[in-house]
Image (cartoon, rainbow, N blue to C red):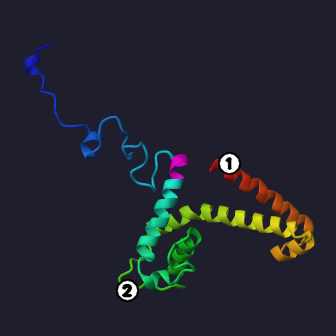
Amino acid sequence: MSTANQRPRSRRPNRKQGRGQSQGRHQGQGQDGGPLDPFSPPRPEQARARRAHAALFRIAERHAATDAQRARQAHPSVLAAHEAVRLVAFLLSGTARAEKGEPEVDEADITAALTLVPRVRGELDELEEGLVRMARGRGMTWPRIAFGLGLGTPQAARQRYERLVERTRADGEDG
């Protein structure tokens, strides 16, 4: 085979390298190996914390940037995760009205709010577990706790509390 008949090799970078990414990294990863786009991570188990932070920041930046927008929440200086979820839900349902110039809630805002739901659920579980523990510490009976929680029996309240203890301990060990 003659070398004169062969085409010269192209010096163009391959597709993965041609989009501003350095060699050795996978497409969609930053220098630290983490995702460039927090809403489509290549390693979901490591990206949830990044996504939750990015979700909270996105909603705050788009829908809690002005004093009037922040006045819609319980703590106007800081947007908590539960308030971010509530704000997106209220804007979507029409319960809260967007200000002039405020962007409409889009699919990424909804994804951001959904990303925060497990965090909000975990915070609420911790709050409920602590409240029941303190109630018991003050001598409150299981029938009274069941009544307060809207449960039918003291046994249901006790079982709920035991599940909360297991869940919050497991979450604390993971985090």
> Would you say the magenta stretch is mainly helix, strand or loop?
helix
Tag 2's secondary structure?
A: loop
Q: Against 61, is 1 above or below? A: above
Foreground: 28 or 68? Answer: 68
72 on left or right of 119? left
SS category of the residue bearing label 1: helix
Depth check: 130 or 69 in front? Answer: 130
Which portion, as a residue range, is magenta? 44-48
Amino acid marked by disc 1: Glu
Q: Residue at x 53, y 77 (%)?
A: 87
Q: Position of residue 144 (x, y in %)?
A: 89, 75
Relative image position of residue 174 (x, y in whole percent): 64, 48
Compared to residue 174, the image places residue 115 above or below, namely: below
| Tag nearer the camera, 2 or 1 | 1
Q: Place residue 23 in its image quadrant.
A: top left
Residue drawn at x 42%, y 42% as measured from the top left: 33
The reply, left or right, for residue 142 in relation to residue 121 is right
Q: Residue furthest front?
A: 138
Residue at image position (50%, 80%) is 91
Query: Few, some or many C-alpha atoms within 10 Å of disc 1 (few <14, some 14-19, many ≥20)?
Result: few
